[in-house]
């Protein structure tokens, strides 16, 4: 039996895109800091990292799809924060963002770290953006690097008999 597992390391080639929502920027800025810290920890050179800002979370899938279509990136980290309010708007936005980002990863066969928070309150958001619950931006970057490594390994794996 063979086991294949991605490891968190900077890709030997290619770029990483950090696609970040400006809406709730106090939170998303902290997620971005976490993602950058992860990439630095795994020796990803700054000159191979691009930060791309969107207006809000709903725009993340369209921009992420455009980024993926360039073929310049081996991994993307998508960062945003959608907080529940008094109307069903939260459910519509959160569902479309998650569905859209997942579809992009599958369609383009690219590593995508999903760091879009869906919280009930600002306190929950800050707890997940560098507070007591860790930094989900860091975790999303780690997942993206592991997935990029795994996809690279699988593309080189010999086919079965």
Image (cartoon, grey):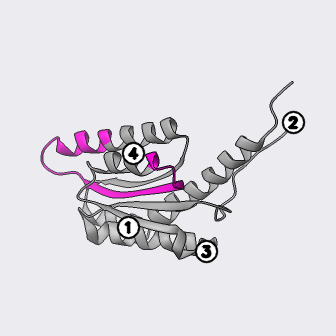
For the residues marked 3 and 2, what is the alpha-carbon distance in whole angstroms? 32 Å
Q: Residue at x 24, y 56 (%)?
A: 56
For the residues marked 3 and 4, what is the alpha-carbon distance in whole angstroms? 27 Å
Magenta residues (range)? 68-96
Nearer to us of marks 3 and 1 is: 3
Check disc 3: other Cα within 10 Å, few if <14, some if 14-19, many if 20+.
few
- Secondary structure of residue under mark 2: loop
Q: Quick one: label 4 or label 2, which is nearer the N terminus?
A: 2
Residue to which mark 2 is pinned: 1
For the residues marked 1 and 4, what is the alpha-carbon distance in whole angstroms? 29 Å
For the residues marked 1 and 2, what is the alpha-carbon distance in whole angstroms? 41 Å
Q: Residue at x 47, y 71 (%)?
A: 34
Q: Residue at x 22, y 46 (%)?
A: 90
Nearer to us of marks 4 and 2 is: 4
The quarter in which the C terminus is drawn is: top right
Question: Can you name the residue that lies furthest to the left here?
Answer: 86
Q: Residue at x 32, y 45 (%)?
A: 62
For the residues marked 3 and 1, what is the alpha-carbon distance in whole angstroms? 22 Å
* Residue 71 inside the magenta-drawn segment: yes
Residue 79 in the figure: left or right of residue 12: left
- Secondary structure of residue under mark 1: helix
Name the spot of residue 9 as percent of width and height, x first. 66, 64
For the residues marked 4 and 2, what is the alpha-carbon distance in whole angstroms? 36 Å
Residue to which mark 4 is pinned: 65
* Residue 88 inside the magenta-drawn segment: yes
Name the spot of residue 24 as percent of width and height, x first. 24, 64
Residue to which mark 3 is pinned: 41
- Secondary structure of residue under mark 4: helix
The quarter in which the N terminus is drawn is: top right
Q: Could you tell me if residue 156 is visible in this image?
A: yes
Q: Quadrant of residue 54?
A: bottom left
Q: Which mark is residue 127?
A: 1
């Amino acid at each position: 039996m063979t086991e294949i597992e991605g490891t968190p390391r900077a890709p030997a080639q290619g770029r990483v895109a950090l696609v970040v929502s400006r809406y709730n920027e106090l939170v998303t800025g902290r997620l971005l800091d976490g993602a950058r810290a992860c990439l630095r920890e795994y020796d990803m050179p700054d000159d191979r990292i691009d930060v791309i800002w969107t207006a809000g979370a709903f725009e993340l899938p369209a921009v992420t799809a455009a980024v993926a279509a360039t073929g310049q990136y081996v991994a993307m980290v998508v960062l945003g924060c959608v907080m529940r309010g008094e109307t069903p708007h939260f459910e519509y936005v959160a569902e479309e963002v998650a569905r859209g980002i997942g579809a992009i990863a599958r369609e383009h066969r690219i590593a995508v770290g999903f760091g879009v928070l869906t919280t009930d309150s600002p306190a929950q958001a800050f707890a997940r953006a560098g507070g007591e619950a860790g930094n989900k931006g860091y975790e999303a970057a780690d997942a993206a690097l592991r997935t990029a490594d795994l996809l690279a390994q699988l593309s080189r794996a010999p086919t079965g008999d």
